[in-house]
Image: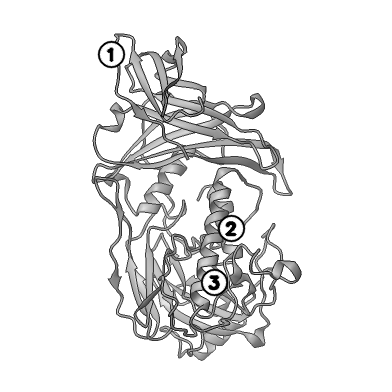
Amino acid sequence: MDTMELREAFRADAQLAGPPPMDPYESVLARRQKSDRRRLATLTAGLAVVTVVVLVPFGISLVGPRDSQVAASPEIPYADVFAAPTRGSLAEDAAFVDGVRQLSWAVPDVRAVPALPDAPVDTRSVVFAGDVADGRWALVIGANNSQPTGEAADPNIQTDVESLSDIAAVWFVGPAGAAPEQMEAASLPRGVAPDLPTSLYDGPTGALVVIAAPGDSIEVSPRPEVTADATVTRSYTDTGSTDGVAVVALDPNPFSYAGMPPVQYRVTRGGVVIVEQAPDSSSIVKGPTQPAVQLQYLRSQGVISGPGDMAQIMAAEVLTEYGLSPAEVELYVHYVGSVPGPNGEPAGLTVLTVTFPSGAVLTRATWMQPLGGPQGPNDVTAFAGGPCVYELSAAGVPVSERILAIRCDVNSGREDPDTESTLVVLVPVGLVMSSLTALGDGGSVASFLGQAAGDGGVVMVPFPEGADRVVVELVDGTILDEVPISAP
């Protein structure tokens, strides 16, 4: 996982939680819709400018549910997910279950997240204990003793109202045959809604556990499919669960440390879909080391600052999100170098395209800029960064022959209101531009002569407001078709 997503996922994991039901039929819908709207607003805002300063122990689960969809009907049956006795293959092992119940909830070396729940032992119970993949997993709940108070307890201002829940939960994992003392926290303790499912997914092994209420139907979709017209679809398979627990073995994903998991699950209760979302994920279950991705660079690379090789990070994120292997896609890096930033301080820009098996193309462009030297007791360097483009397009012209026109807005920190907007145009290697014209609804917005030849087919000019497409003329007089400008 790269540091941009690490921070946002850390915030999501620390804040995902929910209150006990006020009304058994309206609570799930109302709380989940509020939660999803606030989570989406938080993540969207965070992607615009991300300041990475948190320090997190490796392996703690940081990715919260995404893309949640809730049935429109208010008639959602209520069920207590955690009321049933301990479930799982180790449920009858009383010594193991009691040992896990008493494990410490303290998470060492976590900063910037105050007041994590630490449920008193006498309030705890073990919801699930079982052998999963090549290890042992357990879910423990207890009293949420870190509920916000005062104005912070107002559901209308909570990023996620589940932080007000009376119940908190934490996952523990360990190796095969582990004793309780060998189990480690695989998630940050956090409030959970008693009537909504919870889950844990480990990409390196492909193991997934979903905990719902007895009688709930649990379906799983291993990954999204991208069609040639750039439509993203999913298909779900019923796990056959009757006790509200699904233990599923999916294909291992060696890139799962990089980003959001490809798998989603859907839970239906009383004929109503109550959640359709990605699981929480953890990399604490030890798996293979993430391999390097073989990338094709279309032009020479510049040197940019970042929390790692951004092209590798971005490629691994896409492979993770779509559940694909490098052999199934074409990965081209179109540009690695500088892009103008506020106050004359350039940022690093990486432009990557991924061609899916269907021929559809994902274009990603990400900027990144350091915010100064190492900070904090562990000398962690802080970065600002965000997407210029994340766009799917239909199959057609091979990406190595496409013109890419991108709007990139660089804002180097939350306290800096200035944004530098740049039009970046990349033409296929070997072609030389003589002019670039930006067009809008009223026709020509701006023309750039001379400077359009660029360096290696790269043009960067101040973004002409109102422009939504460009026309490129080559030195031989050829005028290329209008190309839409991609923007965040």
Hey, which quadrant is residue 253 in on the image? bottom left
* Picture layout, residue 51 above or below residue 441: below
Mark 3 or mark 1: name the one nearer the start of the chain: 3
Kindly give the residue lying farthest to the front in the view shown.
Answer: 442
Residue 31, numbered circle:
3
Task: Say which element carries label 1.
Answer: loop
Task: Tell me if mark 2 has few (under 14), some (14-19) or many (20+) residues whose alpha carbon lies within 10 angstroms of its own.
Answer: many
Kindly give the residue lying farthest to the right in the view shown.
Answer: 150
Mark 2 or mark 1: name the one nearer the start of the chain: 2
Q: Is residue 231 left or right of residue 283?
A: left
Mark 3 or mark 2: name the one nearer the start of the chain: 2
Which residue corresponds to mark 2? 10
Q: Nearer the viewer, residue 296 or 71?
A: 71
Residue 68, numbered circle:
none
Hey, which quadrant is residue 323 in on the image? bottom left
Residue 106 picture location, percent across and down: 67, 70
Residue 478, numbered circle:
1
Task: Tell me if mark 1 has few (under 14), some (14-19) or many (20+) residues whose alpha carbon lies within 10 angstroms of its own.
Answer: few
Residue flagged by tag 3: what amino acid is it?
Arg
* Picture layout, residue 132 above or below residue 279: below
Residue flagged by tag 1: what amino acid is it?
Thr
* Alpha-carbon span between mark 2 and mark 1: 50 Å
* Total residue callouts: 3
Whether residue 412 can be seen here: yes
Q: Nearer the viewer, residue 304 or 220?
A: 220
Task: Say which element carries label 2.
Answer: helix
Hey, which quadrant is residue 15 in on the image? bottom right
Task: Say which element carries label 3.
Answer: helix
Residue 217 picture location, percent across and down: 35, 79
Whether residue 206 can be seen here: no
